[in-house]
């Protein structure tokens, strides 16, 4: 659990694994260059991957085994199953068994890790940063709050519901013990998502009060969940955005290709940068060469921060 972050500060959290270490390398270099050093970066990986990530440990970055954070015990299935990922994308990430022999995907486990870390964080805010992100502008702890001292909260109200989000909305509503209108269209997905630690604790308390059992047991009953939808719907519909500054602009300028063959165009992406964007991201599942990712990071750094490289 985090123990070295100022109580009024900001912490970064990245859940990663050895398979993503090459793109994580770009993230780590960008954090060291553009994120204020008083913002601690915690990286949670499977215990088997800690040795591979040890090279990134520093005074401001900790490498933590996920087994020491998870609120339950899991049994990892053989990694050679990833060789069958061409049959199913679910096999790309680690697979686990619970003590009750339920199959859990690594993606689901990462969501529990994010919640568990945030609810125990002594920092006022935690920014969840994916491995496929790279910072290109300065990020400081004061960027996490607005002029009134409220923690920033990313949500995008939509005019039309997105069909792909409905399962996450329904799972979040069930976890929180509330009804969500059928036309609910707000989404909360991004590559750099800021959470209030206090709000995360309130969310967990709500889930456990509604079901009378540990929150992770409630979440893992569902075949698919989105931690960002659970937090967002709790913040919007239960907590009524208390202590939060709801905003539609993200910290990250993300490239999410609509098709597998969609090419990343640096100039087009740069043109989309907003003043709040301090980071860029190219989805990890996109076939974007690591060398080009690193080149994009360096070019964007020169363009937006004037940093010497």
Image: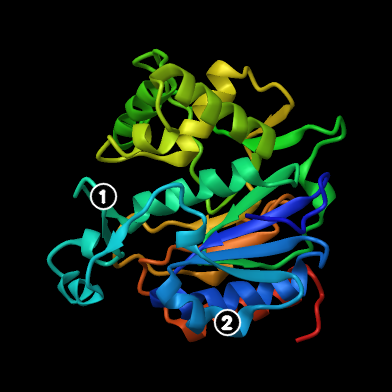
Q: Quadrant of residue 118?
A: top right
| Residue 150: % across, % down | 78, 32
Q: Is residue 194 visible?
A: no
**Which residue is the site of mark 2?**
54
User: Residue 99 — which label?
Assistant: 1
How crowded pointer 2 is (Cα within 10 Å; few <14, some 14-19, many 20+) is rated as: few
Q: Against 208, is 165 above or below?
A: below
- The residue located at (79%, 48%) in the rendering is 143
SS label for mark 1:
loop
| Residue 175: % across, % down | 39, 26
SS label for mark 2:
helix
Left or right: 85 in relation to 263: left
- The residue located at (46%, 32%) in the rendering is 230
| Residue 302: % across, % down | 75, 77
- The residue located at (73%, 62%) in the rendering is 40
Left or right: 126 in relation to 265: right
Q: Residue furthest left?
A: 87
Q: Is residue 284 visible?
A: yes
Mark nearer the N terminus (1 vs 2):
2
Labels 1, 2: front one: 1
How crowded pointer 1 is (Cα within 10 Å; few <14, some 14-19, many 20+) is rated as: few
Left or right: 90 in relation to 117: left
Q: Nearer the viewer, residue 180 or 248?
A: 180
Q: Against 163, is 299 above or below?
A: below
């Amino acid at each position: 659990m985090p123990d070295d972050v100022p109580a009024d500060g900001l912490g970064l959290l990245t859940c990663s694994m050895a398979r993503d270490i090459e793109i994580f390398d770009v993230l780590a270099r960008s954090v060291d260059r553009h994120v204020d050093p008083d913002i601690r970066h915690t990286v949670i990986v499977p215990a088997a991957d800690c040795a591979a990530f040890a090279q990134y440990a520093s005074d401001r970055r900790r490498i933590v085994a996920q087994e020491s954070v998870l609120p339950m015990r899991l049994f990892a299935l053989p990694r050679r199953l990833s060789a069958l990922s061409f049959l199913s994308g679910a096999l790309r990430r680690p697979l686990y068994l619970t003590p009750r022999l339920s199959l859990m995907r690594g993606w689901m486990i990462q969501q529990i890790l994010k919640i568990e870390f945030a609810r125990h964080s002594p920092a006022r805010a935690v920014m969840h940063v994916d491995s496929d992100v790279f910072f290109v502008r300065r990020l400081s702890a004061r960027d996490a709050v607005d002029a009134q001292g409220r923690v920033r909260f990313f949500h995008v109200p939509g005019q039309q519901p997105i069909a792909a989000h409905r399962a996450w909305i329904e799972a979040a509503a069930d976890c929180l013990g509330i009804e969500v209108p059928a036309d609910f269209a707000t989404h909360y997905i991004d590559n750099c998502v800021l959470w209030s630690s206090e709000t995360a604790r309130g969310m967990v308390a709500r889930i456990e009060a509604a079901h009378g059992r540990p929150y992770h047991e409630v979440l893992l009953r569902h075949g698919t969940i989105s931690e960002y939808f659970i937090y967002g719907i709790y913040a919007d519909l239960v907590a009524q955005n208390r202590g939060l500054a709801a905003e539609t602009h993200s910290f990250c300028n993300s490239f999410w290709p609509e098709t597998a063959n969609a090419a990343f165009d640096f100039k087009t992406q740069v043109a989309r940068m907003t003043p709040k964007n301090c980071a860029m991201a190219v989805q990890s599942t996109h076939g974007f060469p690591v060398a080009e990712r690193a080149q994009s990071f360096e070019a964007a750094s020169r363009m937006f921060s004037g940093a010497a490289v």
